[in-house]
Amino acid sequence: MPPFPPDIEAEIRFLTAEEGGRHTPARSGYRPQFYYDGHDWDAHQEFPDAEWVHPGETARTLLWFLSPDAHLGRVHVGMEFEVREGARVVGRGRITKILNLAESAERVGSKR
């Protein structure tokens, strides 16, 4: 888990293998792409309520963006997104809370 608070909280449903999703469960620490507005973004994911999330399950997910400053003012509660591994969609999610995105963006911006 990163040493600072998460940027957002989301609810993610992982697709089943039959839907084109993963064949195996995802684990906390998973780093797929967070896809919206035609762009893939790297994000670290943790599942606070379960260590593993199996295909077909929905999980509350905490996300840390690798470039939080790029998302400031672009993401909002209720926004839908895809979880991807390369070009393959493995899940669909919806942002439920904006947590520490502004603080993360400021921290990253001050290092550039």
Image: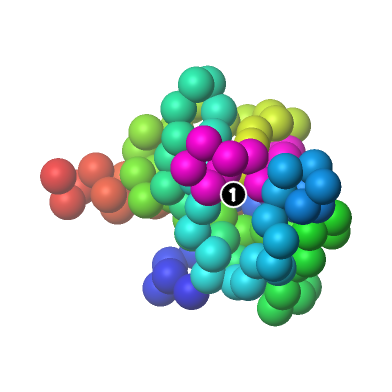
Q: Nearer the viewer, residue 88 or 104?
A: 88
Figure disc tally: 1
Q: Which residues are magenta?
A: 84-97
Residue at the spot x=71%, y=61% of the render?
23
| Above or below, comparing residue 18 to residue 2 in the picture | above
| Quadrant housing residue 52 | bottom right
Whether residue 92 appears in magenta in the rendering, the answer is: yes
Helix, strand or loop at mark 1: strand
Q: Residue furthest top?
A: 37
Residue 48 image position (x, y, % from top left): 70, 71
Amino acid of disc 1? Ile
Residue 107 image position (x, y, % from top left): 30, 52
| Above or below, comparing residue 37 to residue 28 in the picture | above
- Quadrant where the C terminus sits is top left
Residue 21 image position (x, y, % from top left): 71, 49
Q: Main secondary structure of the magenta part?
A: strand
Residue identifier under label 1 = 8
Label 1 Cα crowd, 10 Å radius (few <14 / some 14-19 / many 20+): many
Whether residue 20 appears in magenta in the rendering, the answer is: no
Q: Nearer the viewer, residue 99 or 95?
A: 95
